[in-house]
Amino acid sequence: MKADRFEDLNIYRGARVLAKDIYEISKLPEFGKDFYLLNQIRRSAVSIMSNIAEGFERKGDKEFAQFLFIAKGSCGELRAQLDIVLDQNYINKSVYAGIKSKAEKLSSMISNLITYLRTK
């Protein structure tokens, strides 16, 4: 299926859900005083979505793949920050596992799309 808009991409939809999850957990009172981590993890989530959108809008496979590499890097950054969030007991293990699983799946989906774009 060919997407006409970045909003139609499964990776964009996944990134949007992930960003929503991050914003929800970062509103928790335990998280509220850790301004640096709060800002950083939100920025990572926003970066994933933004780079998928910007790369798609460039309308070239090579450029799109480059922006997807950046999005994938931000996804890794977000996963590392989630570890800190868990270690600081800002969220419980169940919430952590759910969000981490979504982030890992998204990273894999981005990788698959990069591979496709580079070999077509």
Image (tube, grey):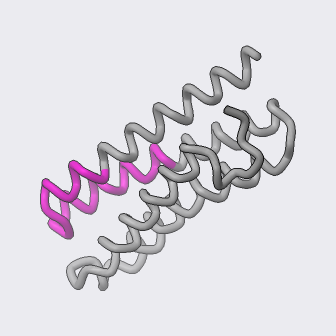
In the picture provided, is 92 more to the left or to the right than 5?
left
Quarter that holds the N terminus: top right
**In the image, farthest residue toward the front:** 1
**Dominant secondary structure of the residues highlighted in magenta in the image:** helix
Per the image, is 78 magenta? Answer: yes
Determine the residue positioned at 74% across, 51% down.
5
Determine the residue positioned at 46% across, 49% down.
77
Q: Where does the image place residue 35, in percent across and percent down from the top left? A: 39, 80
Q: Where does the image place residue 26, in percent across and percent down from the top left? A: 34, 74
**In the image, farthest residue toward the top:** 119
Q: Nearer the viewer, residue 82 or 68?
A: 68
Q: Where does the image place residue 117, in percent across and percent down from the top left? A: 72, 25
Taking 117 as reference, is 77 above or below it? below
Quarter that holds the C terminus: top right
Q: Nearer the viewer, residue 62 or 5?
A: 5
- Magenta region, residue range: 75-99
